[in-house]
Image (cartoon, helix red, strand yellow):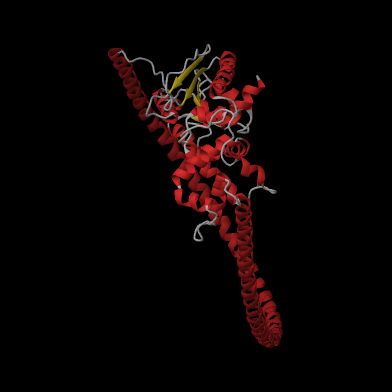
Amino acid sequence: MEQPASGAEPAGAAGDAAETLDRPLPDGVRRRVVALVSDAFGGLTVTELPAQLRQYARFTPNRRAKFAGNAMAAALEADPLFRQRIADRLTQAQPELAAALEAGSPPAAADPVDVAAAAYVLRPPGWVKLVAAAGEEAQRADAERADEEARRELERLREELAAARAQTRNDTERLRTELEAARKEADALHRKLRSAQSDVKRGEAALRRTHAEAETLRAESAAQVSAAESETRRVRARLAEAEASVEASRRAAREGRSVEDMRLRLLLDTVLESAQGLRRELALPPATSRPADTVDAVEPGRMSPKDVAARALSETDPALLDQLLALPQAHLIVDGYNVTKTGYPTMPLEKQRLRLLGGLAMLAARTGAEVTCVFDGAELAAPVLLAPPRGVRVLFSKPGVTADELIRQLVRAEPPGRPVVVVSTDREVADGVAKAGARPVASALLLRRLSRS
């Protein structure tokens, strides 16, 4: 693409001065403009980009639209030369739409938002009207959607009201039926009550007869008790004779048992002496393990990152990171760009790396933990000239290997049981290292811990 001469005003500058928007871009048009700039962005060289956009040169179109949308919109409005370059790229990509806009007759079948976004970039005569028309069209579409939703909601409420009325009628009929059944049941209960009262009267008469019979039975029982007491005395006398006979039998049994006990004791002593002689011949060592040693538990000084997670600390408390790094032989692995773009994304990449590594060096000096910081090096044109600070290992991923995969390789390289802490907000990285036995923590937690140092 040819570049305008130094000091020359780009094409469309006069039109910009004559036509300006008196209101902000509609949201739909602004998003479409950012998408057009992001697509045309990749066709420009680094020197052709404004200074504030050069750090996004290697981003994909989607990432540029996500992270640099505001910056691209501001540069498009404030830098006529940049807008002219984007307009040239748009003209090459969509020549028919560009020609129609320059002729003042946009295609009738085209999306008004697409037409307005292209007109905002190309700035043909009447572009302000096209943008305003797109905004009005979007508002009209929103209003139509709102009306349609209101009609659907009204219809739904009407249906609910009809259903509620039908339910009320059904409930009323059901309650009437239940009331009639309750009345019939009450009448039946009254009849049963009168019958029960008659039964009670008959029962009272029977009770009186029973009392008389009980008095007769008591007299008979007293006579039977007297006879039983006499029989009891005779049984007790016979029992005393039986007990004397049993005691004599026991004495005889004890004398016989003493001989058997002596024989059994002699046999037991023989077995014990034989066992001691066998132990001496086999030179068996004393037992050093006990059944309690086979129970799986955490001994003092052998805690793992998962044990620390069980303590009553919030996942956002920097003290949690201090406890993790206080474990014996702890290894801290940091997803570098994930942390820097969370904490200070507007700084250049070189300054991001230096700031993070300086904080990690202080953290390593304070805790004595092994620290490894991983950066994505797949898109680097040349090796980074960087002197790692003392106590921090700095690694860049090879071409074709992402920083996420390098972090997983580092975790798998550690022996089972060693405390490994991985700092990353990437959910795939966190899930992967957790399955391998490492403890993932969020990037924001490390940033709060470094800011406290």
Quadrant position of the C terminus in the picture: top right
The front one of 413 and 120 is: 120
Image side of residue 269 versus residue 248, left or right? left
Q: Position of residue 285 (x, y in %)?
A: 35, 14
In the displayed structure image, the side of residue 200 where residue 333 appears, left or right: left
Residue 423 seen in render: no
Q: Is residue 388 above or below residue 448?
A: above
Q: Residue 189: image x %, image y %?
A: 68, 84
Residue toward you, 364 or 87: 87
Q: Residue 58: horizontal and vertical position, in percent?
A: 47, 31
Number of marks in the rendered image: 0
Using the image as rendered, state which of residue 286 and residue 395 is in the foreground: 395
Give percent across and percent down for residue 18: 66, 45
Foreground: 414 or 453?
453
Residue under the point 56% across and 39% down: 11
Which residue is at a point 50% across and 14% down the rendered structure image? Answer: 388
